[in-house]
Amino acid sequence: MYQKVKGFRDIYGLESRYWNKVEKVFKQTFKSFNFEEFYIPVLEKTEVFNRGIGSTTDIVEKEMFAFEDRDGTHVALRPEGTASLVRAFVENKLYNTPGISKYYYIGPMFRRERPQKGRFRQFTQAGIEVFGSGGPAVDADIIYLLYKLAENIGIKDFVSMEINSIGCPVCRPAYNEKLVAYLKSHSESLCEDCLRRLDKNPMRILDCKNDKCKTITKDAPVAIDHLCGECGDHFEGVKGYLDALNVPYNINPMMVRGLDYYVRTAFEMVTDKLGSQSAVGAGGRYDGLVQLLGGPDEPGIGFAVGLDRLVSLAMLNETEKENDLDVFVICFKDASDKIAIKLMNELRSKGISADMDYDFRKMKKQFSLADRYGALFTVVIGEDEAAKGTASVKDMLAGTQEEIEITQVTAYISDKLRRN
Ligand SMILES: [Zn+2]
Ligand SMILES: [Zn+2]
């Protein structure tokens, strides 16, 4: 017997139902915001992630499934979607399309993290990217989109939105100087990771989860108090649109983005329903990234949400059933099997889900299979019914039964399903 690779998992049964639901709702919601699906490859040249995510980040340094292919090419399984999508946007010269471009993706990502509860080495992210608009309206609209995703899968009450502005290349250098000066004066209490971050990426220290670091950073200078005029106006704009849309949000000055090309708006959707408070979705504006990956100077903004955790939240609601087949057709070999297989597919062609026992076992066994599939209706075609050209349609919830002409069964059930 084989076992799955450590950190990977199988999804089936009831959980698979919730995945179906969440993915379906996500696609509908993205479509309603006029986003187009972008199918990005699972494998990229490692260089795309080194550049796009940053070669000094944990993801690239420690967590990528990166290897040398047989022809010597260095490739990696994508650890996230943004770098790939920006690579594709530049490679396909999509920046030549006039106006604003809006894309979304849903798919598996791979990170070789230390396995721990609720974390997997293959996980699913859905994300969006918008290219071509630098103004605050798009920032607010996609924060609203993130909020709508939660609402539409029924977990609005389990999450809250946090926003921040982290400045721009104009105002950040002076702010960084102040921050580093403050942190250096308390460096004896910083954790080892933060001591390293002090030179490379001081802002990241603000969201360190280490308790000792937290006691120092709670009084540290924050970017939002050191914004230039343009960043200040931009943030006011974002808040104005969010207020108009009635999105509840908190301003969290300690929320940062790990990479240099992130500017201005940063946001997260957080929950406290999965243990300690944690982000289930995060995004930000990355105006320098398209250029960094070889394209023109084009503004961009996006977010990514972790579906594994959102599905866990959605499952707290218990709305999905393990099975929900519309019709199970019961028949008998040589007597009615051909009539049944035809009827079953006639039902399917009308969008009604239908199934049968391909082995035509005893009636009792066929009924128990119908039960296992959670069939709403069973259609029994016995020898008598076959001779008369009829079928017995049983409404499994109501417990009622009616004999219907075989040619009318699809219309009859279709009508009943519509009414229920
Ligand atoms: Zn600024
Ligand atoms: Zn720390």
Image (tube, rainbow, N blue to C red):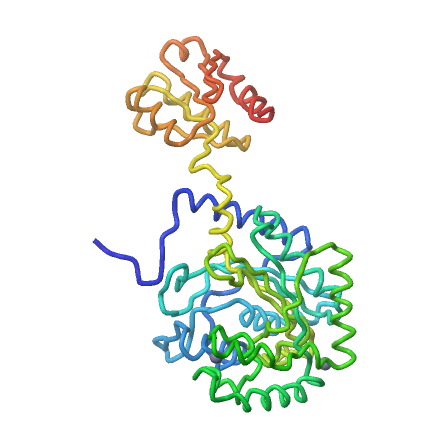
Seen at 42% across and 20% down, the residue is 339
Quadrant of the rendered image containing residue 241 = bottom right
| Residue 26: percent from left, percent from top | 58, 51
Q: Is residue 18 above or below residue 62?
A: above
Q: Relative to residue 186, is residue 245 drawn left or right? A: right
**Toward the viewer: 102 or 135?**
135
| Residue 84: percent from left, percent from top | 53, 70
Seen at 31% across and 20% down, the residue is 364
Q: Is residue 102 above or below residue 168?
A: above
**Toward the viewer: 313 or 374?**
313
Q: Quarter holding the C terminus?
A: top right
Instruction: Report ligand 1 position as a quadrant.
Output: bottom right
Q: Is residue 38 above or below residue 216?
A: above
Q: Relative to residue 147, is residue 280 drawn left or right? A: left
> Number of callouts in the render?
0
| Residue 351: percent from left, percent from top | 54, 33
| Residue 134: percent from left, percent from top | 73, 72
